[in-house]
Amino acid sequence: MITIALSKGRLAEQAIDLLEAAGYDCTAAKEKSRRLILEDEEAGLRFIMAKPADVPTYVEYGAADIGVVGKDTLLEEGRQLYEVIDLGFGACQMCVCGPESLKGKLDSIPNKRVASKYPHITRSYFEGTKRESVEIIKLNGSVELAPLIGLAEVIVDIVESGRTLKENGLDVLEVIADISARVVVNRVSMKMKAQNILPMLEAIRLEIARRQRNDKEISES
Amino acid sequence: MGNYRFHTPDGVSDLLPEDCQAKRGMEQKLRSLFISGGYREIETPGIEFFDVYSGGRFVSPENLFKLTDQEGRILSLRYDGTVSAARLAATLLKDEQPPLRLSYIENMYRFRESGGGRQKEFTQAGVELLGVSSPQADAEVIALAISSALEIGIEDLQISVGQSEFFKGLMEEWKIATDGANEISRFLDQKDTVALERAAARFQLDEEARQTLLMIPALFGTYDAIDQFEARVKNPRALAALMNIRDILDVLDDYGYIKYVSVDFGMVRSLDYYTGMIFKGFTYEVGFPIISGGRYDKVVSVFGRDLDAVGFSLGINLCITAMQRQGKEFVFAGTDVLIGFSDEPGMRAAALTMAKDLRAEGLIVQVDCQQKNEEEISKIAVSQGIEQTIYLQADDCDSFEGEKEDI
């Protein structure tokens, strides 16, 4: 039995589609219900529907063997996992954003206040990469508000299309990392259940390669 | 204040009699196993100076439990067995000629761990083999780790063996400096092939090198895996590392343990600490390795004595968790006999003598200390799951011997 932790919502749907296309029967996971554990004895698969931020935790502790989760969550949680496949979907960027007037001048503000849903990523970027101490203000949503009402100078957040930013007079100042959905595997499961997990990973890789070929053909034709 | 008096702090827990008995049983088995291999047991203090750990940068300070003594010096709770054993080998045991074989079974304290079977306080059993650097010494420690797991009842066991020098040799061959190497080691440790591909491009590795790099996280096996890398690598340091693992496998084959072992050159954590072979042991149902070990030749020198070192530790609590989840039953030895006695003269002395005799025969015997009557004794026995009771009173004194025989 392989236990797969999925991030509730769109990411879970996309992951299930992918697994089906890769040849795994995910009927159990598609069941429309409020149950949080969906099991298919025959297919040898069990799905856990978890909050995205909890997926790395389930996998690290071995409560799930495999997880599908955004790179943003992985960076924020910093768990000891194997991060084996980039699924490509859910693509966006983790960015430092602020008023357009700050473009190119980010380093000139001393003692910055940075608001974010991702305090860990923010800390490691400013302290680790930029070698700068900042005050981090943890928020839980609508982070764009913070610079508008003077709670913080800048924010760190994921940017997909940039529309929300634009509409609020904000812009991307610096890109921290590219984000997309990843397959993560528990370090013990990778060894103990290798004969089930390795073929599954291979099938997923093949399916992704096939999709990329398709996309290329479409864009070329 | 005061509201926490019913609770234990985060990351520590009580051990109830059943679990405690199972754990002590395991510890006893491990102790006997270590001693029979010549690994003399040591006990080091639960509190060390902070400097013991910070001197060699073995542990990041955030992971240590810290307190201060009356002089204002920083102390730390025991973090692992190796560093203390190294300190001992370099100081109190400095006149002993190598090889030194030491073992320990102690509680360790880690400030930032908790949950999922990983607690802030947990028991590790481990050994250190100091003053020898040979594949046979490496294999002896790996074999002892395997024996330990088998001895306490872990049946599904996998040991992954790696070599830190292999990675360091590759970095030399590809002329990648420390910062880059650290970055790549992190990607390897996470088997993050996406990041490895990018790193290969960034460090301008040629096609051959790129393929080798990507093989590291993907290739498992034994001799076959070593063969494949040997054909691709030219750096003498990396080749020596491969040779070392080949030799270790040969010895493990002589132990009859090769079936538990596979190589994994992607294990590249703590490169400053490990100087050669690295290994980890896994079983089902816990998300963390139950065994961790390797060669760390520079650890003892931090304390002023040049002694090569190889060792391992096994997490006993993790093993218990794993075995419970694997459905293994631990047999609990409860009380066999409850003895009660009447208040007539001589009965107490008779009861105590009888208890002593029965205990000498290996039974677990409780003697009533509340002057209960025969009926009450039976009730107590039922409620505590004690199968046999004996009630001593004057009129059937003659049959005592008979009753004892029955039991």
Image (tube, coloured by chain):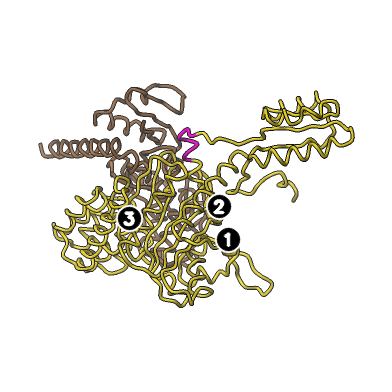
Q: Classify residue B215 as left or right of residue A194.
A: left
Q: Residue at x 53, y 49 (%)?
A: B27
> Which chain hosts label 3?
B
Image quadrant containing the N terminus of chain A: top left
- State the brown chain: A
Q: Is residue A169 visible?
A: no
Q: Residues within 10 Å of mark 3 (few under 14, many from 20)?
A: many
Label 3 sits on what residue type?
Answer: Met
Question: Do we see residue B73 in this rendering?
Answer: yes
- Label 2 near label 3: C-beta < 8 Å? no
* Badge 1 amino acid: Phe
> Residue B120's mark?
2
Residue at the image point whose x is 40% and y is 57% from the top: B293
Q: CA distance from mark 1 to mark 2?
A: 9 Å
Disc 1 to disc 3, C-alpha distance: 27 Å
Disc 2 chain ID: B
Q: Is the residue at mark 1 from the same chain as the one at mark 3?
A: yes
Whether B272 is drawn above or below A139: the answer is below
Give the residue type that dot 2 points to: Lys
Q: Disc 1, disc 3: CB below 8 Å? A: no
Q: Is residue A58 above or below residue B36?
A: above
- CB atoms of marks 1 and 2 within 8 Å: yes
Q: Residue furthest left?
A: A221
Where residue A119 appears, as percent x and y from the top left, is 48, 53
Numbered badge on residue B267: 3
At a point 25% along the width and 36% down the height, the residue shown is A199
Quarter-wise, where is residue B366 in the image?
Answer: top right
Q: Which residues are magenta?
A: B322-328
